[in-house]
Image (spheres, rainbow, N blue to C red):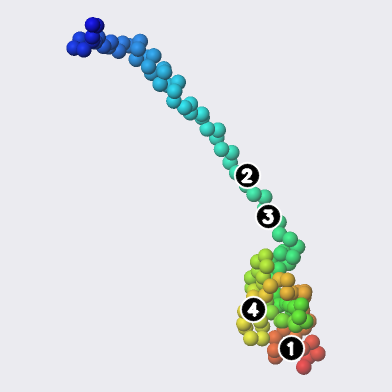
Amino acid sequence: MNSTIGKAIPISTPTARNAAEARAKLDSMQPKLVKAQPQQQPQPKKEQRLSPEADYIRGLIDTQAPVFVALQTGEDIACRIIWCDRYSVLISDSADNQELLIWKHSIRSLRPAENQIWMKGGDNDDGK
């Protein structure tokens, strides 16, 4: 009976050659790291050009020019435009100094309040 029980089994000691082979084997098993490409700097946005409508309204806001807002319902409101966004306009009613938020789709037109009575008690063109 050839039994190995109780017999010493020789264990090989690692050599420099075995260590280098083991290191190479481990390196080949690890995922390769790919050097990341440098990210391109985002291009500066071109100055966004406003539509003619937005330019006109922005000018009215900046100068606080008096205007008449003609609504789809047929009403005219003497006011100044305070603020606007894509869908609405905030106006200050000249008669009551109240602020009104109006949907743009409910506005028929805007017209300057030149040569017209702007506020109650204002001067008329005929001098009265």
Q: Looking at the image, is mark 4 or mark 3 earlier in the sequence? A: 3
Q: Residue at x 69, y 79 (%)?
A: 79
Place residue 14 in its image quadrant. top left
* Disc 1 secondary structure class: loop
Task: Name the foreground residue: 85 vs 15.
Answer: 15
Percent across and percent down for residue 50 are 71, 59
Measured Cα–Cα span from mark 2 to mark 4: 40 Å
Residue type at numbered disc 4: Leu
Front: mark 4 or 1: 4
Q: Mark 2 = which residue?
A: 43
The correct choice, above or below, for 12 with respect to 79 in the image is above
Q: Report the quarter where the N terminus lies.
A: top left
Q: Mark 1 = which residue?
A: 123
Residue type at numbered disc 2: Gln
Asked if the residue at tag 3 contacts the one at tag 4, i.e. Cβ–Cβ closer than 8 Å, the answer is no
Q: Residues within 10 Å of mark 3 (few under 14, many from 20)?
A: few
